[in-house]
Amino acid sequence: MKGSKTIVQMSVRERQDILAAVADALETSAKEALIEGNASFAASSGNLALTIRGSVHGLANTDLKAAEFLLQQAMTLIEQFRFRDPHRPETLTLH
């Protein structure tokens, strides 16, 4: 496994991939929050995902400080949702 890289050390493609993966995680968390009745978190998470997706080209190519800030915000938001209840299952399954 390769060592971790800073956003500056990543290629444009790597930055695009990480931004897309984080947006996917935000969207998944938003869906889970809606299922649990947490509309406020769902809206925040979904809006941040849309912001990242809508700006991915600029963020990955030239606006690295903004990309880093948005990634930090996204990870904080996801972490707060995941760890708010220690008995919560890792993922929800819809039947």
Image (cartoon, helix red, strand yellow):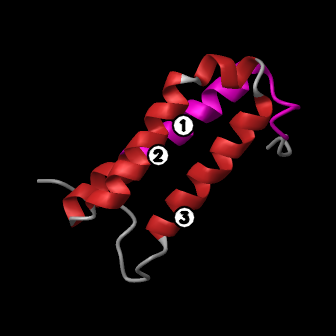
Q: Secondary structure at mark 3?
A: helix
Instruction: Check residue 25 in the rendering and tell me which mark sits there, or answer none.
Output: 2
Residue in the image at 35% along x and 71% along y: 89
Q: Is 7 left, or right, of 91 in this rendering?
A: right
- In contact (CB < 8 Å): disc 2 and disc 1: yes
Image quadrant in which you'd find residue 69: top right
Does the magenta portion include 16?
Answer: yes
Find disc 3 in the rendering and name its residue: 79
Identity of the amino acid at label 2?
Answer: Ala
Q: Earlier in the sequence, mark 2 or mark 3?
A: 2
Please report the residue visible at 83 percent of the width from the left and 45 percent of the height from the top: 4
Q: Which mark lies nearer to you, 3 or 1?
A: 3
Q: Which stretch is magenta?
A: 6-27
Where does label 1 land, which residue? 21
Q: Say what amino acid the circle numbered 1 marks.
A: Ala
* In the image, residue 27 above or below residue 56: below
Q: Give the image location of residue 63, x and y in percent.
A: 75, 26
Q: CA distance from mark 3 to mark 1?
A: 15 Å
Residue 9, relative to residue 71: is it above or below? above
Element type at mark 2: helix
